[in-house]
Image (cartoon, rainbow, N blue to C red):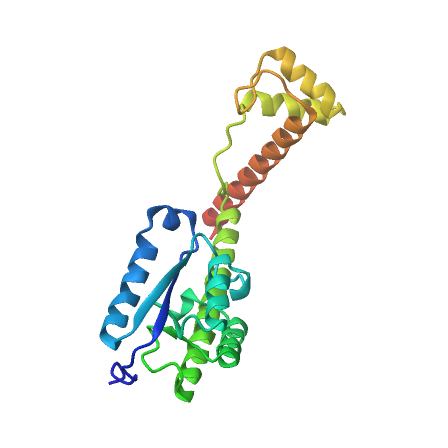
Amino acid sequence: MYERMYVSESKRVISYARVSTGAQAASGLGTEAQHRAVRAAAAERGWHIVDTYTDDAVSATIEPQKRRQLATALTRLNAGEADVIAAARLDRFVRSVRDLQTLLDLAADGDWEFVGLDVPINSDLAVSSFLRTVLGAFNELERELISERTTAALAVARSRGKRLGRPSLQPQEAKELAVAMRSGGESLRTIATALTESGIRTATGKITWHAASVKALLRTAELDRQAEANAQRHTAEQRDS
């Protein structure tokens, strides 16, 4: 019932799109779909698109004025070169209530509008400001819930002995030798010399070990030990339950 609740009049519009990951930016598909949605809405409403701006691989947590492309668009709006900035969804602009309020204040001060096409009401109406604030709050809540779920899932994975991150490429024999020598009180430099003389290559295929690479090797060995201990504890808990 709301999709027609806007004033059809000629306005100069800047189309804005944003993707948060490098993969999305490389494909170009995400941003093109966003601009296509704005073009369709502009054609329906009688708007004229004067330019398009795209922030590639930019998180919504970055303040609007600190995103290079959006900041340029805002400057043009404040200079009176456009009347509206539009995006396919509100969360392309902001994902926090604080940044949403900032954008609302900028629009009011500059006498221009910003439109998220998922807010189906003319952006200069009071009820639209209310809806945008509510949607902004939901977006912020969603982001926080995702973060909490991710943290909880990682904790469970670690407790079950899962080794998180990229698989270790460090040679097992190098880890065993380094741990044994470190337990005997040897320095990182001494261990590096021993590993070099043994002919064991580093994870990157180099024949020379250094104190820094030995330190990383020992850290990997410690993570392996923790993962194994967690796995054994989890197995014991499952057996006793």
* Residue 138: percent from left, percent from top: 44, 74
Q: Nearer the viewer, residue 63 or 200?
A: 63
From where the camera sits, is residue 145 visible?
no
Q: Nearer the viewer, residue 53 or 96?
A: 53
Q: Nearer the viewer, residue 12 or 211?
A: 12
* Residue 186: percent from left, percent from top: 75, 23
Vertical relation: 239 (above or below) 198: below
Q: Which residue is outermost to the bottom?
A: 126
Query: Residue at position x 63%, y 15% from top?
Result: 196
Vertical relation: 53 (above or below) 230: below
From where the camera sits, is residue 144 visible?
yes
Vertical relation: 31 (above or below) 223: below
Q: Quadrant of the N terminus?
A: bottom left
* Residue 75: percent from left, percent from top: 50, 67
Query: Residue at position x 31%, y 61% from top?
Result: 35
- Residue 190, located in which quarter of the rendered image? top right
- Residue 233, located in which quarter of the rendered image? top right
Left or right of 9 on screen, residue 175: right
The number of discs equals 0
- Residue 114, located in which quarter of the rendered image? bottom left
Left or right of 113 on screen, residue 213: right
Query: Residue at position x 23%, y 74% from top?
Result: 44
Q: Nearer the viewer, residue 230 or 125?
A: 125
Vertical relation: 21 (above or below) 78: above
Left or right of 215 on screen, residue 101: left
